[in-house]
Amino acid sequence: MYAMVLAARGAPLVFQERPDPVPGPGEVRVKIGACGVCRTDLHVVDGELPDLHYPIIPGHEVVGRVDELGSGVTEPSLGTRIGIPWLGSTCGVCPYCRMDKENLCDRPQFTGYTRDGGFASHIVADARYCFPLGEHGDDAALAPLLCAGLIGWRSLVMAGEGKHLGIYGFGAAGHIVAQVARWQGRSIYAFTRKGDEQAQSLARSLGAEWAGASEDRPPVELDAAIIYAPVGALVPLALRAVRKGGRVVCAGIHMSDIPAFPYSILWGERQILSVANLTRRDGIDFLNTVSRTNIQTHTTVFPLDQANEALARLREGRLVGAAVLRP
């Protein structure tokens, strides 16, 4: 197999040839067709997440076909196209797992973080945590759905059912969630970096009522706002934009510190919520929704050995939509 490997914090990924992995009991090996590049991959590469062990292969928006089964596995079967998400496995016995909150598991495994991920030609995954994808759609177009879409879906559910929804950071997750929210009949207000005309244009093309800079006030009070950019300073801005009783949902796994803000902008029963990981139920519900809508992902495709360039463009805000690697 071939892989882009992270050997140390902040180091560039290195292209390596390795022996093909062998699936253990309950696992499948997948020949990868595409893997999305997520902002969480930047947090892994930059060492911003705790308990990183090197070397590690990043990547957790994986689409491919099962090409070997470990013992005890009957589903998914050989040749099935599946998606492998961020949540790689859970313990099944901690209090959170027993409460059907496996996204908060005390002893989870995460694809591309605590177990090798999808910046590679092959990957081994726990068969129980893979999603069948069917045969409709291109691998590269589907890849962003496996995290940007799934975390976007969970954050949209947590935002509640309000009509006026703000999206801060209109990248991979934002452009997918906007389409789902529009299908649900909501009005979208997109917030981007100042002067980012490409992202604002994409938002308008997907039906946003308004698009502007994060510092701008939208033309209406928002029922909820979702923050996808890992910028803590956006929280007070979003609080000022939502109505009384409104929600601000922080959707990233890592965010810079939230600055001090006056209690007056939180008062009025406004809420700040965070999204942690996902559950398999999230995946089932979201993929069922995808099958009933016409979600179009906007992607820039890179060869596997150009993963460093894809990460650099993501870090610098030079991508519209999502980056995807093809082995």
Image: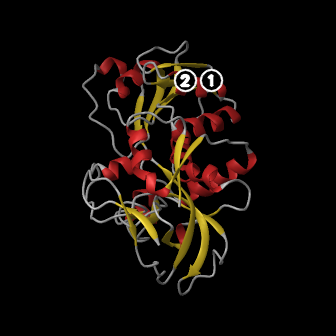
Whether residue 61 sits left or right of residue 239 in the image: it is right
Q: CA distance from mark 2 to mark 1?
A: 6 Å
Residue 92 coordinates in the image, percent (x, y): 44, 70
Identity, as a three-letter code, of the amino acid under mark 2:
Gln
Residue at (55% x, 39% y) in the render: 156
Identity, as a three-letter code, of the amino acid under mark 1:
Arg
In the figure, residue 181 lies in which quadrant? Answer: top right
Whether residue 285 sits left or right of residue 105 in the image: it is right
Residue at (65% x, 38% y) in the render: 180
In the figure, residue 284 lies in which quadrant? Answer: bottom right
Residue at (63% x, 74% y) in the render: 76
Residue 85 coordinates in the image, percent (x, y): 51, 59
Residue 14 vs residue 324, the one in the foreground: 14
> Would you place residue 241 above or below residue 282 in this image?
above
- Badge 1 crowding class, 10 Å Cα cut-off, few under 14, some 14 to 19, many 20 or more, is some
Whether residue 119 sits left or right of residue 149 in the image: it is left
Mark number displayed over residue 200: 2
Label 2: element kind: helix
Label 1: element kind: helix
- Name the residue carrying label 1: 204
> Would you place residue 140 above or below residue 252 in this image?
below
> Would you place residue 119 above or below residue 252 in this image?
below
Q: Are marks 2 and 1 in contact (CB under 8 Å)?
A: yes
Residue 289 coordinates in the image, percent (x, y): 68, 48
Whether residue 42 sits left or right of residue 80 in the image: it is left
Q: Residue 95, can we see it?
A: yes
- Badge 2 crowding class, 10 Å Cα cut-off, few under 14, some 14 to 19, many 20 or more, is many
Mark number displayed over residue 11: none
